[in-house]
Image (cartoon, rainbow, N blue to C red):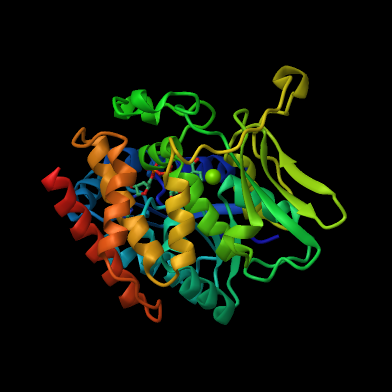
Amino acid sequence: MSIKNVCILGATGSIGLNTLDVIAQHPDRYQAFALTAYNNYEDMLELCEKHQPRFVVMVDERAADLLDALLRPKKLAITVLSGAKALEDMASHDEVEIVMAAIVGAAGLKPNLAAAAKGKKVLLANKESLVMSGQLFMSCVNDSGAELLPIDSEHNAIFQCLPQNYTCGEFIGNSVNRILLTASGGPFRTWPIEALRKVTPSQACAHPNWEMGQKISVDSASLMNKGLELIEACWLFSVTPSKIDVHIHPESIIHSMVEYIDGSVISQMGNPDMRTPIAYGLAWPERITAGVSALDLFQVGQLNFERPDVTRFPCLQLAKDAFNAGGTACASLNAANEVSVASFLKGNIPFTAIPDIITRVLETVPVNNVDSIERVLKADLDARRVAEEIIVSL
Ligand code: NAD
Ligand code: MG
């Protein structure tokens, strides 16, 4: 078996590090060929020493220079590149076979598209790119023959519950009744609405079951993560929101389910550890070890389920409405959310302002057809500008 070259977009992040962990467990199968990050050159230096990739991209030029200077005396054969275009070059590099798409936010869109257009095996963690440009991204995958495997734990679970010969993007078939998309409910699941106004960024980032980057942690707390995932599922499995039922499941043991027309419900379970979906994506259709501890259901004891409360957590409904509005509405939703979350993390707006700002942005920015990537990027920019104006005026 030949060793496969992997490009990890967002290598210093939570998904990136988990991916490197799985790769390091299987040096006979995978090697880190290219690692990318925004500006965290100190963490990247450590990753370079440990994983010895051939290429590193630091999007920030100064960080690239600093990393290069630190690497030179170590005499490792690593080329350091900088700038956003280098992300696309690495994602589409001839020697790369697998691309882990794990940049956070809209910044992942262009490199993910570059990987898909080159027909790579794309392991998709970055849900924002699919939310922004679902139609374009899925047709790019279809045209190039790229292999798209979902890494988001819920979508990976759904993929595992579908028939073995299922390909992402295909209609899931008449034998499927519903997708049951599970959600932990986040750290504020049981909090009263008045208390939500005062939550701090560190409370929002303290997820009960998963350790993740800051942005997705805040999204999980607001349920926007589930909203983005609902849109992601619509594109990956060719369904509309009416076929998807969100189930709050606080234990995060069932990662999602597929209900068939004969009444069978198939679920995928496991401890909440992203190395499981990452290993599944890397090795599919085979299975490899991931370093994940065995699930002890006696210890878990109970599995609970609740309906989502859209009064306290309006973001889920906003996402459904944006998908149903179609066109660039989802790109605007995503951009407004990114700006609002960044502002909340800086302490500039209360947690409860996030859905209010998104609502106002969606009312202001016109919806256009998604016929080109430029249209998507324009909606993204317009929504960011409007969101920033609203925040300044608060
Ligand atoms: P993170 O914040 O931990 O890491 C983000 C990575 O992206 C870092 O390597 C960072 O350097 C890089 N990055 C940030 N801004 C960039 C930019 N402008 N240009 C280029 N690179 C940039 O995030 P994460 O939690 O690993 O999440 C990554 C993606 O995976 C997100 O889209 C998230 O929704 C998705 N995801 C994460 C998890 C999880 O458990 N963490 C689960 C499911 C899906
Ligand atoms: Mg998820």
> 377 left or right of 127?
left
**Residue at the location (45% across, 69% down)?**
326
For the view shown, which residue lies furthest in the front direction?
311
> In x, y percent, where is residue 324?
49, 65
Say left or right for 311 vs 215. Answer: right
Q: Position of residue 172 (x, y in %)?
A: 71, 66
**Residue 195 appears in the picture as rendered:** yes
Asked whether residue 74 appears in the rendered view, the answer is no
Quadrant of the image containing the N terminus: bottom right
The tally of labels here is 0
Q: Kindly identify the residue that appears in the image at 59 percent across and 64 percent down.
A: 240
Residue 369 quadrant = bottom left
Quadrant of residue 106 in the image?
bottom left
Position of residue 153 measured from the top left corner of the image (x, y, whole percent): 59, 45
In this orientation, which residue lies closer to the viewer: 37 or 262? Answer: 262
Q: Residue at x 38, y 37 (%)?
A: 218
The x and y percentages for residue 41 are 27, 43
Q: Nearer the viewer, residue 184 or 166?
A: 184
Residue reaching furthest to the right: 262
Q: Quadrant of residue 44?
A: top left
Quarter of the picture containing the C terminus is top left
At a point 44% along the width and 23% down the height, the residue shown is 191
Residue 236 horizontal side relative to residue 48, left or right: right
The answer to whether residue 91 is left or right of residue 139 is: left
